[in-house]
Each structure stands twice: as C-alpha cells, then as structure tokens.
Image: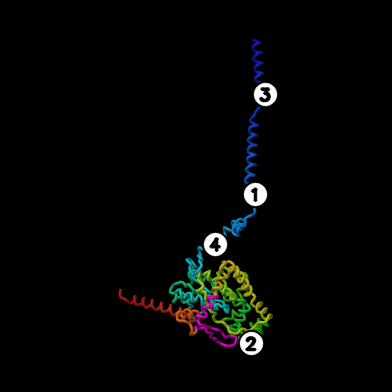
Amino acid sequence: MARWIRRKTANSKKKYKHKTNTPNIFPWILLLILIGWTLWAIWHFSRSVIVPSLIKRVTPRKEKSFQEDFKEENEEEALMMIDEDEIFRKEMDLISGSTCKNGPSGVLLLKTHKTGSSTLANILNRYADQNNLLMAIPHRNSRFDWPHMFNVKSVDQKLMNNRRAQVLTNHARLNRVAMDEVMVPRTLYISILRDPVKQFESSFYYLEMHTFFGLKFSENPLQDFMQDPNKHMNKLKSRQKPENYGLFRDGMLFDLGYDQLELKRIGVRKAIEILEKEINLFLILEYFDESLLLLKKAMCWSLENILYFKQNQRTTKIPINTATASKIREWNKADVVLYEHFNATFWRKVKDYGPTFKEDLKELRHYIHEWSKRCDRQEVVKGKDASAVRFYKVGHKAKPEHREMCQRFFRKELEYIQEFRMSYFKEFHDKMQIYNKFKRSPT
C-alpha cells in the first residue's frame, strides 16, 4: 500500500512539473495581431497622405480658375452665391436681347428735380404707350399731390377703375406703403441722382429762387445767396414760403420723402438705410447712358427701349467758382452724403453687369446717333436767360416710317399724361354708358 501511494505521488509531481513548464502563447498571439494592425495602418497612411504630398511637391501645380479657387477657399460662401444667382435668374430670367419670361410687372420712377428725370420719364412713358400698360394718373394736374407726401387718393381712382397701375412717372414724394397699394406686385422702384452742386445750381435758376430773396437784379444771384443762405431763408415768413420751398435745401432728399425736420429726427444715414430697401435702383445723371444699361438689365429690355433724346435741358449755365461750390456742398450736405453713397453702389452694379457692358454702351450710343439723323432732330428754345430750356422736334427730312417713333421720342411729359388721361376717361365713359344702358333696360 505504501509503495502504491509513493508511485501516485511521484506521477502527480511529474504532471504538475510538465504543466508549469508549458509556455502560455496567447499574449504573444495578441501582440503579433497588434503589430500587424500597426504596420497596416502605417502602410495605408503613407500610401494615402505622404506619397501624394511628395508627388505634389515635384509635380507642377495646375492653374485653377477663379471659381475653383473660390470654392476651395470658401465653399459655403460660394454655394450661397450660386443659390442667390440661381434665385436671381429665376426671378428675372435675364436673357440677352429683349426676351424675358419673368421680369418686373411694373416700374415706378421716383422723380427728383433737375436730375434728368424728364428724359427718363419719356423712356417709361414711351414704354407704357407702346405696350398698352396702365399708367397711374394724378387726380389733378400733373403731380401726385406734390409737395405733400404721396397717398392712395393722389391717384385718380375713377380712371384706374379698381385696377393697379403698371407705370408711374409723374412727380410724387416717396411713400412706399401707399405706392405699393397703387402699383402692381413686383414693381421695380427707381430714382435718379445728380451731383448736388450742379443739381442745386440748376434748381436755383429753374425755380427762380432768387426772386424770393430780393436778388432778382444781382449780377450773380447764386453766389450772393450762398454768402449767407440762412439769413435769406429766415427772411421768408411762413405765409411767403412757396410750395417748392422744400427744394431750397437738400432737394433730392426732399423728393425722396425727407424734409429738414425728418432728417434732423432720424439722421441722414438712417434715411439712406431706409432708401436702400425702398428703391431698387438709383441712376446717376453724370453717367446716364451707363445707368440706362442697368435699367435695361433690371427690366429685361432691349436697347431700343432705352433710346432717348434729352428733354427739358437748359441752354445756358452760369459758371460756379470753387468757393461757391464748397458752400453749396455744405448747404446741401445731406444730399452730398446721399449722392456719394449711391454713386458707390452704382459702380458696384456696373461691375456686376457682365462682360458685355462696354460693347452694349457703344451700341447704345451708336443707335442714339442714328436715330438723331433719322428724326432730323430740330432744336426749340423756350424761355430766356438762365431759365431758358431746350426741346427738340421732328424735322421735315424724317422719313414716314420713322416719324411715329420720332414723335414719341420728343413728346413732352404733359402731352403724354394728357393722352393717357383722355384714353382712360374715354374707356371709363364707355363703360358708364354700357352700365347705364343695362340699368335702364327692363328686366
């Protein structure tokens, strides 16, 4: 028995010794797997990053277009610009030539005094005439309650016959809310500005301001007035103030709805901020042809739509010395800020016009010259001295096939508005006759 026990004990010790000496290979297998993963990661990284970067260093860089560069640097902004451009195309659908599927439904000209707005009005009146568009007619005379602010009752509602106007060109002081009620939806609001020194000088003599200040016999009334404008203005009592008194200082802003009290209340910068939202396009008289190209693009017109001859142009201009010009700018400093601001935005719009701008400008001036010859343009002067203005009429050499178009070029504002008024009145009268006849007929 003892011998058997000793044998068993010896065998168990051998087994235990064998177990303790056998190595555990599991950690080694795990280590090999980790090393393999690490080597694979290094190989993949070098293949996808390091090698291409080395190739890029030795390979000449291919020139990228502005659009590609822009998208890489600021992809989000580029996408935003593409979206805006797509919206603009859908909204305006600008196509070269005269075709436009979805342009503005109407156009409103916010006229400013002595800025070439009469010439601009002729373009719009002609457009309404040729396309049988509904023109807004003042309820009396030829202005929409100017110098008071525009209101719905400023329009002859009877002649409108519960319809909304597609074009408005006569003098009105800006009131966007009331104007939106009168005009069709998607109306383009435009206005025009001029260098404040030239604009004030022109207004001064056209409105005969010097007669209100006892400067009628002065050799240089404007220069004398600018010596002390406040003194001259204070001489005018309330009952002596003419209806165009608002044009005696910062006249362009007055037409745009801001008199001196309102400018003091909100400030010039705030007024400009509001105007940026309310007026879609400001034209600049000093660059009238360039301005018309912007109008053509905004309205989806052809060059034929913007052909023109100057209207209501003065024959003589009195020179202004540097000192007087400086005083005029100081006196009309709100208008100066207005002009400088929208002159800057104007040139940004010109830059955005596209590559055909110079060619279109050249073509426009060529057509104007050609039509001047076709119409045999003849000059007519009305008035005298500094207030004299130049008009044009069709000459006897104009061919019959051109005469009708030429007459439209030279038709005055008052003639156009009277023509529209009579046409709408006849339409209204005919409808009333039909209504009365129907009312009297037995049932």
Q: Nearer the viewer, residue 367 or 26?
A: 367
For the C terminus, which image quadrant? bottom left
Could you tell which of marks 4 and 3 lies nearer the N-terminus? Answer: 3
Q: Which residue is mark 1?
A: 55
Q: Which residue is mark 3?
A: 21
Q: Position of residue 345 (x, y in %)?
A: 60, 69
For the N terminus, which image quadrant? top right
Q: Are marks 4 and 3 in contact (CB under 8 Å)?
A: no
Range shown magenta = 365-394
Could you tell which of marks 2 and 4 lies nearer the N-terminus? Answer: 4
Up the image or down, 370 lies above or below 61; here it is below
Amino acid type at image mark 1 = Ile
Left or right: residue 374 versus residue 321 is left
Choose mark 1 or mark 3, whichever is in front: 1
Q: Quadrant of residue 379?
A: bottom right
Amino acid type at image mark 3 = Asn
Q: Work out how far the residue at label 2 is from the one at label 4, CA to CA, in angstroms.
A: 55 Å
Q: Position of residue 19 (x, y in %)?
A: 65, 23
Choose mark 2 or mark 4, whichever is in front: 4
Left or right: residue 135 versus residue 6 is left
Residue 85 marker: 4
Label 1 SS: helix
Amino acid type at image mark 4 = Asp
Q: Are marks 3 and 2 in contact (CB under 8 Å)?
A: no
Could you tell which of marks 1 and 4 lies nearer the N-terminus? Answer: 1
Q: Which residue is mark 2?
A: 215
Amino acid type at image mark 2 = Leu
Q: Residue at x 62, y 46 (%)?
A: 48
Q: Nearer the viewer, residue 39 or 25?
A: 39
Could you tell which of marks 3 and 2 lies nearer the N-terminus? Answer: 3
